[in-house]
Amino acid sequence: MILSRTLAKSRMARGARPGWAAAWAPVMFDAACLVFVFMLAYRPFQSLVETFDMPTWAVVTALLALGFIPVQAVLIFSSLWAAKSRFQDEDGNQ
């Protein structure tokens, strides 16, 4: 998310309008980083669930709070910056 924001702000300051791939590549990078982090965290989380014998509702709540909501926040903000960097109004202004 930091990469997307930094690139978008620098492009907007220069007045450059990136292509589709250049604008959305940082979003894909953010998504790949999130997948990597969750691949690393999956086994410790699974061990924690088995150790404490957590009920299903607690596991679902933990996954929602620790996984789904942060992932959505990062991807939404990255996508907003990507779209903002590509924005051009009807007059051709950025």
Image (tube, helix red, strand yellow):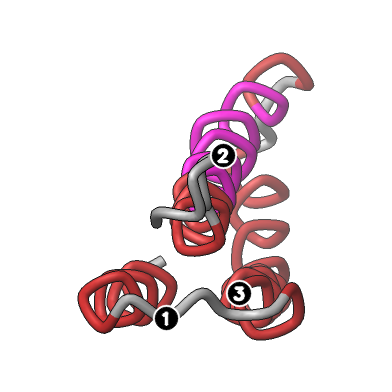
Residue wearing tag 3: 23
Mark 2 vs mark 3: in front: 2
Residue wearing tag 1: 16
Q: Is residue 33 visible?
A: no
**Mark 2, other Cα within 10 Å: few <14 / some 14–19 / many ≥20:** few
Q: Amino acid at mark 3?
A: Ala
Is-magenta flag for residue 10? no
Q: Which region is colored magenta? A: 59-76
On the rendered image, what quadrant is the N terminus found in? bottom left
Residue wearing tag 2: 90
Classify 9 as above or below 60.
below
The residue sitting at 61% across, 69% down in the picture is 27
Q: Residue 82 sits in which quadrant? A: bottom right
Mark positioned earlier in the residue sequence (2 or 3): 3
On the rendered image, what quadrant is the C terminus found in? bottom left
Picture coordinates of residue 36, whole percent (x, y): 67, 81
Mark positioned earlier in the residue sequence (1 or 2): 1
Picture coordinates of residue 13, whole percent (x, y): 21, 75
Q: Amino acid at mark 1?
A: Ala
Mark positioned earlier in the residue sequence (3 or 1): 1
Mark 3 vs mark 1: in front: 1
* Separation of marks 1 and 2 at Cα, in angstroms: 16 Å
